Amino acid sequence: MSTLLKTVEAFPRGRSSQELYALIDTDFTATRREEILTELLSLQKRGLVLLGHDNKWRTATRVIAKSSGPEAGTPARACTNQVEAMVASPARFGTEQDAFVFASEELEVDGAINANALLRYYRAALQSDPRGALTQANDRHGTAF
Protein backbone atom coordinates (compact mmCIF):
# COMPACT_ATOMS: atom_id res chain seq x y z
CA MET A 1 0.00 0.00 0.00
CA SER A 2 1.39 3.38 -0.95
CA THR A 3 2.26 6.10 1.51
CA LEU A 4 -0.14 8.45 -0.22
CA LEU A 5 -3.06 6.05 0.18
CA LYS A 6 -2.23 5.55 3.86
CA THR A 7 -2.10 9.32 4.31
CA VAL A 8 -5.50 9.81 2.67
CA GLU A 9 -6.96 7.00 4.80
CA ALA A 10 -5.62 8.65 7.94
CA PHE A 11 -7.90 11.66 7.39
CA PRO A 12 -11.54 10.53 7.02
CA ARG A 13 -12.77 14.10 6.55
CA GLY A 14 -10.44 14.48 3.60
CA ARG A 15 -7.45 16.60 2.70
CA SER A 16 -6.97 18.98 -0.21
CA SER A 17 -4.19 18.53 -2.74
CA GLN A 18 -2.22 21.37 -1.19
CA GLU A 19 -2.49 19.80 2.27
CA LEU A 20 -1.36 16.44 0.91
CA TYR A 21 1.60 18.12 -0.79
CA ALA A 22 2.60 19.68 2.52
CA LEU A 23 2.18 16.39 4.40
CA ILE A 24 4.10 14.20 1.97
CA ASP A 25 6.49 16.47 0.08
CA THR A 26 9.38 17.17 2.42
CA ASP A 27 11.59 19.10 0.00
CA PHE A 28 8.76 20.99 -1.79
CA THR A 29 9.92 20.39 -5.36
CA ALA A 30 7.68 20.74 -8.38
CA THR A 31 8.58 17.29 -9.70
CA ARG A 32 7.58 15.66 -6.42
CA ARG A 33 4.25 17.51 -6.50
CA GLU A 34 3.61 16.22 -10.02
CA GLU A 35 4.42 12.67 -8.86
CA ILE A 36 1.96 13.02 -5.98
CA LEU A 37 -0.74 14.31 -8.32
CA THR A 38 -0.22 11.48 -10.83
CA GLU A 39 -0.34 8.95 -7.99
CA LEU A 40 -3.58 10.51 -6.73
CA LEU A 41 -5.07 10.29 -10.22
CA SER A 42 -4.00 6.66 -10.59
CA LEU A 43 -5.54 5.83 -7.19
CA GLN A 44 -8.71 7.58 -8.33
CA LYS A 45 -8.80 5.53 -11.56
CA ARG A 46 -8.42 2.33 -9.52
CA GLY A 47 -11.34 3.44 -7.34
CA LEU A 48 -9.40 3.71 -4.09
CA VAL A 49 -9.74 7.47 -3.55
CA LEU A 50 -12.36 10.04 -4.49
CA LEU A 51 -12.18 13.77 -5.01
CA GLY A 52 -15.12 15.30 -3.16
CA HIS A 53 -17.22 18.31 -4.10
CA ASP A 54 -15.15 20.37 -1.64
CA ASN A 55 -11.91 19.43 -3.51
CA LYS A 56 -10.75 17.12 -0.74
CA TRP A 57 -9.38 13.65 -1.34
CA ARG A 58 -11.02 10.82 0.62
CA THR A 59 -10.83 7.06 0.48
CA ALA A 60 -13.61 5.42 -1.50
CA THR A 61 -14.06 2.59 1.00
CA ARG A 62 -12.69 2.09 4.45
CA VAL A 63 -11.37 -1.34 5.24
CA ILE A 64 -12.28 -2.36 8.79
CA ALA A 65 -10.43 -5.35 10.14
CA LYS A 66 -12.85 -7.84 11.67
CA SER A 67 -11.87 -10.61 14.00
CA SER A 68 -12.45 -14.04 12.49
CA GLY A 69 -13.87 -15.56 15.68
CA PRO A 70 -14.27 -15.15 19.39
CA GLU A 71 -11.18 -14.22 21.34
CA ALA A 72 -9.45 -16.84 23.42
CA GLY A 73 -10.43 -15.27 26.76
CA THR A 74 -14.14 -14.73 26.05
CA PRO A 75 -16.79 -17.43 26.38
CA ALA A 76 -18.71 -18.46 23.27
CA ARG A 77 -22.08 -17.16 24.48
CA ALA A 78 -20.62 -13.69 25.11
CA CYS A 79 -20.02 -13.25 21.40
CA THR A 80 -23.51 -12.44 20.13
CA ASN A 81 -24.55 -10.18 17.31
CA GLN A 82 -27.42 -8.60 19.24
CA VAL A 83 -27.35 -4.85 19.37
CA GLU A 84 -28.84 -3.16 22.41
CA ALA A 85 -30.94 -0.13 21.62
CA MET A 86 -30.27 3.08 23.46
CA VAL A 87 -33.28 4.35 25.36
CA ALA A 88 -33.61 7.96 26.42
CA SER A 89 -34.16 8.72 30.10
CA PRO A 90 -37.18 10.79 31.06
CA ALA A 91 -36.31 14.19 32.45
CA ARG A 92 -38.00 17.38 33.61
CA PHE A 93 -36.45 20.75 33.02
CA GLY A 94 -37.18 23.86 35.00
CA THR A 95 -35.91 27.39 35.29
CA GLU A 96 -34.72 29.27 38.33
CA GLN A 97 -34.08 32.96 38.77
CA ASP A 98 -30.49 33.95 39.29
CA ALA A 99 -29.34 35.24 42.66
CA PHE A 100 -27.97 38.32 40.88
CA VAL A 101 -31.50 39.37 39.95
CA PHE A 102 -32.53 39.29 43.60
CA ALA A 103 -29.45 41.24 44.66
CA SER A 104 -30.01 43.98 42.08
CA GLU A 105 -33.65 44.32 43.17
CA GLU A 106 -32.54 44.78 46.79
CA LEU A 107 -30.03 47.48 45.81
CA GLU A 108 -32.62 49.50 43.92
CA VAL A 109 -34.98 49.82 46.88
CA ASP A 110 -34.45 53.54 47.47
CA GLY A 111 -33.45 54.34 43.87
CA ALA A 112 -30.93 57.06 44.87
CA ILE A 113 -27.18 56.82 44.42
CA ASN A 114 -25.13 57.93 47.41
CA ALA A 115 -22.38 60.12 45.93
CA ASN A 116 -20.40 60.26 49.20
CA ALA A 117 -20.28 56.47 49.38
CA LEU A 118 -18.99 56.31 45.80
CA LEU A 119 -16.27 58.86 46.58
CA ARG A 120 -15.21 56.93 49.69
CA TYR A 121 -15.03 53.74 47.61
CA TYR A 122 -13.01 55.48 44.90
CA ARG A 123 -10.55 56.95 47.42
CA ALA A 124 -10.10 53.56 49.12
CA ALA A 125 -9.50 51.87 45.76
CA LEU A 126 -6.85 54.42 44.81
CA GLN A 127 -5.10 54.14 48.16
CA SER A 128 -5.01 50.36 48.02
CA ASP A 129 -3.30 50.50 44.62
CA PRO A 130 0.25 51.88 44.98
CA ARG A 131 0.22 53.21 41.41
CA GLY A 132 -2.53 55.69 42.27
CA ALA A 133 -1.57 56.67 45.80
CA LEU A 134 -2.95 60.07 46.85
CA THR A 135 -0.26 60.70 49.44
CA GLN A 136 2.65 60.94 47.02
CA ALA A 137 4.97 63.88 47.55
CA ASN A 138 5.19 66.50 44.78
CA ASP A 139 8.98 66.26 44.47
CA ARG A 140 8.82 62.50 43.82
CA HIS A 141 6.01 62.65 41.26
CA GLY A 142 6.82 60.39 38.32
CA THR A 143 10.01 58.97 39.81
CA ALA A 144 8.65 56.26 42.10
CA PHE A 145 6.47 53.64 40.54
Image: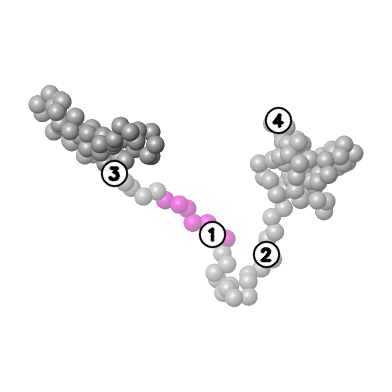
Q: Quick one: label 3 or label 4, which is nearer the N terminus?
A: 4
Q: Which residue is mark 4?
A: 53
Extreme residue in the front direction: 139
Extreme residue in the top direction: 112
Q: Position of residue 108 (x, y in %)?
A: 14, 28
Q: Quick one: label 2 or label 3, which is nearer the N terminus?
A: 2
Dot 1: what SS? loop
Q: Position of residue 120 (x, y in %)?
A: 17, 33
Which image quadrant for residue 49? Answer: top right
> What's drawn in magenta, residue-wise?
81-87
Which mark identifies residue 82?
1
Dot 4: what SS? loop
Q: Quick one: label 4 or label 2, which is nearer the N terminus?
A: 4
Which of labels 4 and 1 is toward the front? 4
Dot 3: what SS? loop
Q: Quick one: label 1 or label 3, which is nearer the N terminus?
A: 1
Q: Which residue is mark 2?
A: 67
Which of labels 2 and 1 is toward the front? 2
Which mark identifies residue 92?
3
Query: 65 and 117: which one is in front?
Result: 117
Q: Position of residue 113 (x, y in %)?
A: 15, 25
Q: Quick one: label 2 or label 1, which is nearer the N terminus?
A: 2
Which of labels 1 and 3 is toward the front? 3
Which mark identifies residue 19?
none
The amino acid type found where label 1 is placed reads: Gln
Extreme residue in the left direction: 110
